[in-house]
Image: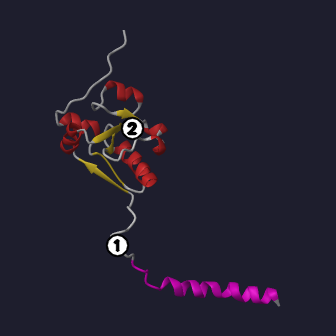
Amino acid sequence: MRRAALSLALATLPILGSGLAACAPVPATTSAAATPVAAVETLPAAELAALVASGDVVLIDVRTPAEFAESRLPGALNAPLGTFEPATIPIEDDRETILYCGSSRRSGIAATTLSEYLGTTVRHLEGGIAAWNEAGLETIADEPAE
């Protein structure tokens, strides 16, 4: 008797499932108290330069240590994508953390990871340090070892 009831229940699942698929999705509601949404945005070099000049950012370079030593934005910290751990990235209440790399590919990946971890929007430099250099903005490098 149990086996017959189970067989009947399993046989009706595809019918029930197809009926549910035809239902319209329930629209999401929006409210002022909505939870922040994870998102990634880019910002142009000129906008980042203004933020850097005002001291309102924490810069994170996600390139390799060798690339970082060769040329970086002033004040940047190094958190290579290969070992990127969002829990170790400094997040401050009064300064925005912004990521960058060579072209914005790696920083986009890291920004997505950080955004998902924090549940908020994370921005990264559009075009990376290449765009920064193209705009004629200042970079620094480590002194060569003798």
Residue tagged by mark 2?
Answer: 62
| Residue at left offset 50%, top offset 82% | 21
Q: Is residue 8 left or right of residue 128?
A: right
Q: From this view, report whether residue 129 is shown above or below residue 16.
A: above
| Residue at left offset 19%, top offset 35% | 134
For badge 2, the amino acid type reads Val
For badge 1, the amino acid type reads Ser
| Residue at left offset 35%, top offset 73% | 30
Q: Position of residue 133 (x, y in %)?
A: 21, 33
Q: Position of residue 15 (x, y in %)?
A: 59, 88
User: Residue 31 bears which disc, if any?
Assistant: 1
Quadrant in the picture for the N terminus: bottom right
Q: Secondary structure at mark 2?
A: loop
User: Residue 144 bears which disc, if any?
Assistant: none
The residues colored magenta run 2-27
Q: Is residue 11 left or right of residue 27?
A: right
Q: Is residue 91 left or right of residue 56?
A: right
Q: CA distance from mark 2 to mark 1?
A: 35 Å
Q: Is residue 118 left or right of residue 141?
A: right
Q: Position of residue 136 (x, y in %)?
A: 16, 33
Residue neighbourhood size for the residue with mark 2, other residues' Cα within 10 Å, grouped as few (<14), some (14–19), many (≥20):
many
In the image, which is nearer the foreground, mark 2 or mark 1?
1
Reply yes or no: does residue 43 show up in magenta. no
Whichever of callouts 2 and 1 sits on the residue coming sooner in the sequence is 1
The foreground one among 32 and 78 is: 32
Quadrant in the picture for the C terminus: top left
Residue neighbourhood size for the residue with mark 1, other residues' Cα within 10 Å, grouped as few (<14), some (14–19), many (≥20):
few
Q: Position of residue 54 (x, y in %)?
A: 21, 39
The foreground one among 94 and 19 is: 94
* Colour approach in the figure: secondary structure
